[in-house]
Amino acid sequence: MIERRNKIVLSILISCLIGHTISAANDTINKSESIRDGETLVSSGGMFALGFFSLANSTNRYVGIWYNHIKPNTYVWLAHREAPLTTKSGALTLTDSGFLLLLDETNATVWSSSTTATTPQNPAVQLLDSGNLVVKDAENLLWQSFDHPTDTYLPGMMSLGWNLDTRVETYLSSWKSHDDPSPGDFTAHLDPTGYPQIIVRRGKTVKFRLGPWNGVRFSGSPGTRNNPTLNMNKNEVKYGEDNVDGSVIARLTLSLEGVGVRWIWNDQSKSWMTYNLEADACDNYNACGAYGVCSVGDSPICRCMDRFVHRDEGNLSLGCVARTALACEGDVFFKYSGMKLPDARNTTFDDRKMLPADCEAECLKNCSCTAYKQLDIREETSGCLFYYGELFDARTMAVGGDELYIRIASADLEKDAESKRRKRVKLVASLASMAATVLIFLVLILICVWKRKKDSNPYKEGQYSGSLGQEADLPFFSLPLILKATDNFSIDNKLGEGGFGPVYKGVLENGQEIAVKRLSKTSKQGVDELKNEVILIAKLQHRNLVRTLGCCADGEESMLIYEYMPNKSLDFILFDETKSMLLDWKKRFNIITGIAKGLLYLHQDSRLRIIHRDLKASNILLDAEMNPKISDFGLARSFGGNETQAQTSRVVGTYGYMSPEYAIDGMFSIKSDVFSFGVLVLEIVSGKRNRGFCHDDHNENSLNLLGYAWTLSKEGKSCELVDPCVGESFNLSEVLRSIQVGLLCVQRCQEDRPTMSTVVFMLGNQVELPEAKQPGFFAGRDVGGGRSYSSSNATNSENQLTITWSQGQGR
Ligand SMILES: *[C@@H]1O[C@H](CO)[C@@H](O)[C@H](O)[C@H]1NC(C)=O
């Protein structure tokens, strides 16, 4: 003790001279030594400190561990949670027999560690740079704080779960309140019942569940960025995570509300970024009852698994029952994918290596087996997991879902065949009605033309003199009216060049400003597209889509009239050095979310399912408040029903925004729009065009914007991507989320890209985002995966080059 005090006096002297803290080198308490209130241990690398402290509104004293350099103090571990010291005279001491004791002012023991060895040799306590406080002797680890976590999980702990020899469980429990660290209502467990899962409970009630383990991670968690590891043998079932990158300061806590929260320290902003593991209504345990599937994109969120029906349509949370009861003999299985697997507490597993067919045969042998899956998603042959009884708590996953084979009665399949027949009849009916629609449209065009001819005085009836009818309920503008409004299409009024003709500004007699898209007379292809656009846009109403005021058809001339957007198009502002200053981060984020919502409407919420196919900065218009409006549906295609993908022999789109499968194979789907959206997001964040972007610092091959953004993100330097014009003040969490969402959208494989509903959700919520793989079109000149394409510059203006690609070419 005396020696220790001298040491401290000496280090005070030294620290006065060189400015270090007294305990900079002290990470160890030796046998029979102690530290008192006011003294601290600091781990050798300076990451963590251990000592005495009080919490906000209390004078109680606790002993715990916190990050040495992060202010305010963040406590990752406490020795004793329930019986605080009431004075500043406590001491933490190590006994000869290797027990770590916390003594109060009367030298009574308030808390004690346990130990495994009976006669340890020279025990010592050391605070490690991982945040682990260990008691060890020459040979053995006697005790470690990592085996006794409080509400915080630190990377490297491999301890959550059960020691099967001693039947001792290690779990997290929440604090009672901000100034009372004693165990609150919530606990987080690795539950090995059936097959290992993570279960958060409030008291005895299950609140949230992740799992079961699928070989690489718990079903329902999107990624493996945290190196999830499950150790399962006859001695233990334990789960752990670790930092992939040691430079990241991360932790996971169970909050006061019982929500798992990931924390990552951002050293640039000196603040914690957080992600909630439990993010939406579908994460509430068993939200949809037996055989229900919860899906946040749906309204209501609960539906039944295929071939199951709601028990009570008025109360969906009561769950579902099989449409046809299982017969046991001769039942069949169908595959359900993209899901968080149901609760696996009522399961058994067989870990012999088997093929899916073997699992199926096994499951069929037992009439109460209702579903099966392979244990390890990495292997073709692996063990099988068998579910018994009703299936609970399944949900859809936007990314990283799992597959499950669910048992159904074979008699049910016959019902299916029946309904297919009925669907076919429906399809014929809808084709017939489609033909009728086209016919009506043609008739209306004729009426339009006829009316105009008849109408000798175009101004007689005011602004418009007819309508394209119910199908396309658009006012008709007369040509002379448009000529007057645009000053005979004066070059001064030209706003720009659209996909199939110039766009002019105009002012109507009542003072209303309009934009007129004039179809080039020579372009036959354009006429079709205008018609297409007319039909489509008449039905589309959304605050993030540009509003169409009417149309005009006069002999050779076809025009569309839009509301005028005073701030023109996004590219006009975003890529201009001075104008881009107008777009601070708040505006940019608003633009990103606005485009996402507009696109979601096109893909999903509008009555038709529409793929834009030419989403780019010049097709995003900005109103006076800089709200984004998607324009130019000339290339849009509409799909009835579930058809979301098609192939075209003519690729029309803009290089730099096109997805690989569209540019190379002519495959377009809602996921090709998602790709273009991702490019747009990265352009908005960086203020740089993807096309024409070149960055040589990182690689021998020059990187395009996508590759550059991905490389920065991998190196944890995403902030460098942000346009300097945004200025100093931006919401870092929004910036990082936007970049991550952008990168996920530009994944090479369509399956890896989220849908727009997921994008909207990810942008609007602090959820954990999956990891992005290398984007499609990574390097500057990587356009077509080695295949050739021909470009035609029939409509090229400065920043747009339309690629035409025919099937057969380049193959
Ligand atoms: C079916 O499986 C359940 C659950 O493992 C078990 O209790 C039951 O004995 C099995 N029945 C047969 C006939 O093997």
Image (tube, helix red, strand yellow):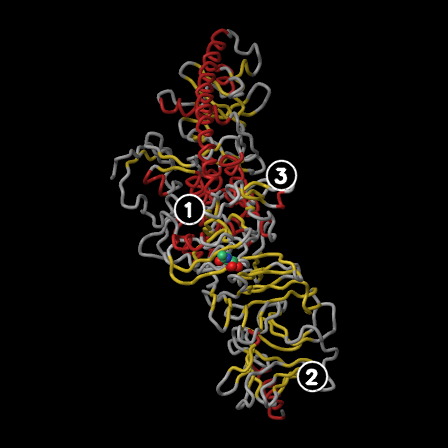
Of discs 1 and 3, which sits in the foreground? 3
Mark 1 residue element: helix
Q: Tell me the residue that label 1 is attached to.
A: 751
Q: CA distance from mark 1 to mark 3?
A: 33 Å
For residue 195, say whether it is visible. yes
Q: Which mark is residue 109?
A: 2
Tell me what residue is drawn at x 61 percent, y 52 percent.
Answer: 284
Q: CA distance from mark 3 to mark 2?
A: 60 Å
Kind of residue at badge 2: Thr
Q: In this rendering, would 712 be left or right of 284?
A: left
Rendered image quadrant of residue 112: bottom right
Tell me what residue is drawn at x 30 percent, y 33 percent.
Answer: 792
Q: In the figure, 63 relative to 727: above or below? A: below
Mark 2 residue's CB less than 8 Å from ligand 1? no
Q: In the figure, 130 relative to 405: above or below? A: below
Of discs 3 and 2, which sits in the foreground? 3
x and y percentages locating residue 251 in the rendered image: 55, 65
Mark 3 residue element: loop
Q: In the figure, 262 relative to 280: above or below? A: below
The quadrant of the picture occupied by the C terminus is top left
Q: Which one is nearer the viewer's eye here, 68 or 194? A: 194
x and y percentages locating residue 641 in the rendered image: 47, 32
Q: Tell me the residue that label 3 is attached to.
A: 313
Few, some or many C-alpha atoms within 10 Å of disc 1 (few <14, some 14-19, many ≥20)?
few
Q: Which one is nearer the viewer's eye here, 358 or 75? A: 358
Mark 1 residue's CB less than 8 Å from ligand 1? no
x and y percentages locating residue 561 in the rendered image: 50, 23
Q: Which one is nearer the viewer's eye here, 497 or 637? A: 637
Mark 2 residue element: strand
Sequence-first disc among 2 and 1 = 2
x and y percentages locating residue 229 in the rendered image: 47, 65
Q: CA distance from mark 2 to mark 1?
A: 59 Å
